[in-house]
Each structure stands twice: as C-alpha cells, then as structure tokens.
Image (tube, helix red, strand yellow):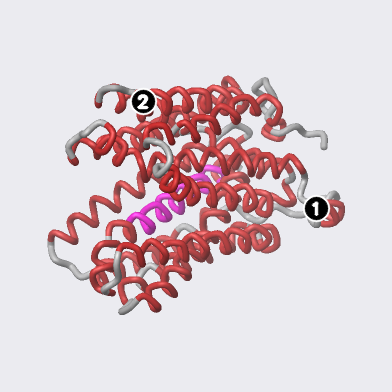
Amino acid sequence: MQRTLRLGRGATFAYFVLNGFLMGMWIVHIPVVEQRTGITHATLGWLLLLLGSGAFVGMRLAGPLADRIGPRKAVPLGAALCSAALVLPALATDAWTLGGALLVLGLGNGVLDVSMNTHAVQVERGYGRPVMSAFHAVFSVGGVLAALVGALTLSADWSAATTLGATAVTGLVIAALAIPGLLPHEPPTQATAAAEARRGKTPSRIWILAVLAFMLMLCEGVANDWSVLHLKTVLDAPAATAAFAYGAFSTAMTVGRLLTDRLAGRFGATAILRHGSALGAVGLTLAALAPTIPLALVGWTVAGAGLSGCIPQLFSAAGHFDPTASGVNVSRVAGLGYLGMLAGPAVIGPLTHLIPLNLTLLLPTAFCAIAAVAAARILKPSPSAELTTLVGATR
C-alpha cells in the first residue's frame, strides 16, 4: 500500500510540473505569437479572456468527470488535451484563430488543473497527513523550467511552432508514462446515493471556501501583474530592479509551499490559513506604503510567504469535505478562485484612475484580513491526523 501511495504521489508531482511547464511555455512565447498574428496589445488582452473562460469551463466540466470516471482517467485526459492544444497558438494566423486556440488551451488547462488537484486530495487522504502544498510548489518549478527552456530555444531562433510542437509531444509522452502511478478510482461507499442526492445543492461551507479562494487568488493575481509596475511607477525603480518584485514574490511563494505541509501537519490548516492570510496582509501593506525600494521588496517577499500555503489548504478542505464529490467541490473552489486571479489585475487598473497605484493595494490587503478572521470559523482550530477534520466532519 505504501508503495502504491508513493507511486501515486510521484505521478501527481509529474502532472503538476507538466501543467506548470506547459502554461509557462505559452507565457514565454506570448510576444512571438502576438507578432506572428499581427494583433495589438489591446486585442491580446481581450483574447486572453478567452483563455480564462476556457479554463473556467474546463474546471466546471472536470469536477463531475473526475467523480464519475475517477482521477486516474480524468488526469491523463486533461494532460493530453492541454499538451496537444499548446501548439495551436503557434499555428494561429490572426485574432480569430488565436482566440479559438486560446479557448481550447484554456479548456485543457482547466480540466488538468481540477483533475490533478482531485487526485492530489486522494493521495493526501491515503497518507493521512498534509501533502497538498508541495504539489502546488512544483507547479511553480515547472514554470521556472519553462522560462529556462524557452529562453534557450528563443535564443537559438527556434520558431514558436517548432518549440511548442516539441513541448506538446513531450507533454503527451509524460502524460502517458505517468498513468501507471496514478491511484485507482476509490470505490463508491454506502453514502454515495445520499451524496448524489445532495449534489444538486452546493453546501454552504463549500461556497465559503470558494469565496475565500476568490479573495486570496485575487491577491495573487494583483501581485503577479502589478508588483513590477508598482516599483517602477511609484518608487521610480529601474526596469531591471522592478522585475525583482515579482521574483521576490514568486520565490517566496514556492519556498513557502515547500514548507507548508510540514507546518500544516504540526499546527493545523486553520493556523496556516489564519496566520498566512494575516502575514499576506502585512506584506501587502508594507509594499504599498514603503518609501524605499528595498522595503517594498521586503513587503512583496512577506506577502508571497504568507499567501503561499493558503490556497492549497482551501483546495484540500474542499476535496476532503465529501470524498464522493471531491472533484465537484474542488472545481467549485478552484473555479471561483481562478476568477479571482483574473479579476484582481482587472480591478486594480480602473482604480488607479481614482487613487494612486500603491493605495489600490489596500484592497487585496483587506481581503487577506477577511480571510484571516474567517479561518477559525471555516477550518477546525487544532491540528488532527484525520484530514476530514480540515473542514469539520459533521455536516
């Protein structure tokens, strides 16, 4: 049994790294694809909404699919779709074809995201201790790997079609090779019939988890898209120095997620969400009000460290709430969270017409504070060896 769990955990790591790598390779090639299709920055911004829309639809579809056929089948399906779709943007010739390509790519990303998180919940249930955050950490590692590979291929003058095509084939191979390690679909229990009857109505606790995910992922989206611009426009940092804002935030996120599982096992999910959200609020406030560049970088680092372990706790809690509906519940929390990731940068832009950019960062600060206060009401206050107590076993 332990060998089966180790293989399942290894396979889950592989799919998380693959997902981060695939999406990272797309991000690296955005300027090349934009130039190839001859579109403007404004048009690209609108087309990226199709990527997000496709991902949201994919997430909503993947939840019931994973519950019905099991993550063992749903995860490779999502990985194959996401891998194959990666080459499509490189083949696009205008805005219309690029829009269609991004819609399909987003769909594949959404299916892979929810199905692999659902499998991660199954692995975590088998281990009986927190392991979710490490999976999210290696997703970031996949993105870093994509940046390195993309830099090499671009410097070698490889075309986007060649690079993304080769990446797609590699992704398909990895998706196939990792299948044997995936855990078998958990057999239905006696509670399955009752659970099916409940699925028409989403439990209020799941919606609360989803709202918290929306707020906290909005904070992540703001940091990803506005941290560099904050240093450049508010503190007059040189472009190269301003880039360190995002680097500091993302590095702290990755390191924090590598440490979170151990901390969650010792102190409990409530402590991670409460103190992590509070630390995120402190970091964002420090970044917003910092009078100097070094202090602002410290703020972004603290914010990344604080937020790093929060979302994995929410995904884990949603998945463990009802083992017969893990996929559906994860898809609801992940889907609303993803909308928050998209909404954050979009909300900050219009606000900058009314108040200075640094003061707009107080909005995500408030969301972090709300999450910190709500943590004790959503997750149990004391650590437990039984993961079902992450959200309260009695419903």
Is 21 magenta? The answer is yes
Residue 4 x, y percent position in the rendering: 56, 46
- Horizontally, residue 20 falls left or right of residue 60, namely left
Along the line of sight, which residue is nearer the eye, 43 or 189? 43
Distance from the alpha carbon under mark 1 to that under mark 2: 41 Å
Q: Residue at x 48, y 23 (%)?
A: 279
Residue 186 x, y percent position in the rendering: 70, 52
Q: Are marks 1 and 2 in contact (CB under 8 Å)?
A: no
- Horizontally, residue 365 falls left or right of residue 38, namely right
Residue 42 x, y percent position in the rendering: 34, 63
Residue 126 visible in the snapshot: no
Secondary structure under tag 2 reads helix
Task: State which region is magenta.
Answer: 4-24
Along the line of sight, which residue is nearer the eye, 64 or 350? 350
Q: Residue at x 37, y 73 (%)?
A: 98
Q: Which residue is mark 2?
A: 299
Q: Which mark is residue 201?
A: 1
Q: Residues within 10 Å of mark 1 (few under 14, many from 20)?
A: few
